[in-house]
Image: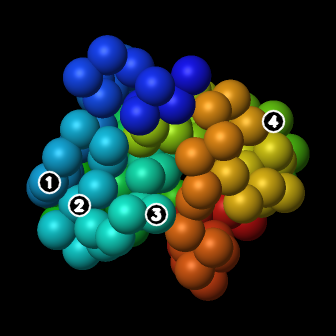
Amino acid sequence: MTRSERPGGAVPAGPPVHGPTIDDHTRCIHYGTELDIVAIKFFCCGRYYPCHLCHAETAGHPSAQWPRTQWEARAILCGDCKAEISIADYLEVTACPACGAAFNEGCRLHSHLYFE
């Protein structure tokens, strides 16, 4: 069920997303387009942030990349349905496998900041 199909367009609860978010779809002050609905669980702290800049500004420690050997970890959060997606699956899709919400394909330009 997509956001538009839920009563009132409500967004389900999910894990907390840290940093300067601007809505309940994980968008932040740095990336706030309609397609910016992904949060990443950072390897260094196990906390979800909308982007590398949010982590850098608020986490209080340097980030660390997810090792390739751990890409089966569910470390991607869809801001639309709150499904947690494995890194490996996320890197292969352009939309959420659970709800079909489109992801910003430009985020792939930053994958090296999150994943080995």
- Label 3, label 1: how many angstroms apart (C-alpha)? 14 Å
Circle 2 crowding by C-alpha within 10 Å: few under 14, some 14–19, many from 20: many
Residue 86 visible in the current orientation: no
Which tag, 4 or 2, sits closer to the chain's start? 2
Across and down, in percent, residue 109 comes to 61, 83
Circle 4 crowding by C-alpha within 10 Å: few under 14, some 14–19, many from 20: few
Task: Determine which quarter of the picture holds residue 31.
Answer: bottom left
Local secondary structure at mark 3: loop
Local secondary structure at mark 1: loop
Which tag, 1 or 4, sits closer to the chain's start? 1
- Label 1, label 4: how many angstroms apart (C-alpha)? 29 Å
Residue 22 tag number: 1
Type of the residue with mark 2: Cys
Give the labeled residue for mark 2: 28
Q: Quadrant of the N terminus?
A: top right
Task: Determine which quarter of the picture holds residue 46.
Answer: top left
Which tag, 3 or 2, sits closer to the chain's start? 2
Across and down, in percent, residue 59 comes to 22, 52
Residue 72 tag number: 4
- Label 3, label 2: how many angstroms apart (C-alpha)? 12 Å
Answer left or right for 106 relative to 17. Answer: right
Answer left or right for 103 relative to 8. Answer: right
Circle 1 crowding by C-alpha within 10 Å: few under 14, some 14–19, many from 20: few
Q: Nearer the viewer, mark 3 or mark 1?
A: 3
Eyeballing the image, is 107 above or below 5? below
Type of the residue with mark 3: Leu
Q: Nearer the viewer, mark 4 or mark 3?
A: 3
Q: Are marks 3 and 2 in contact (CB under 8 Å)?
A: no
Answer left or right for 72 relative to 106. Answer: right
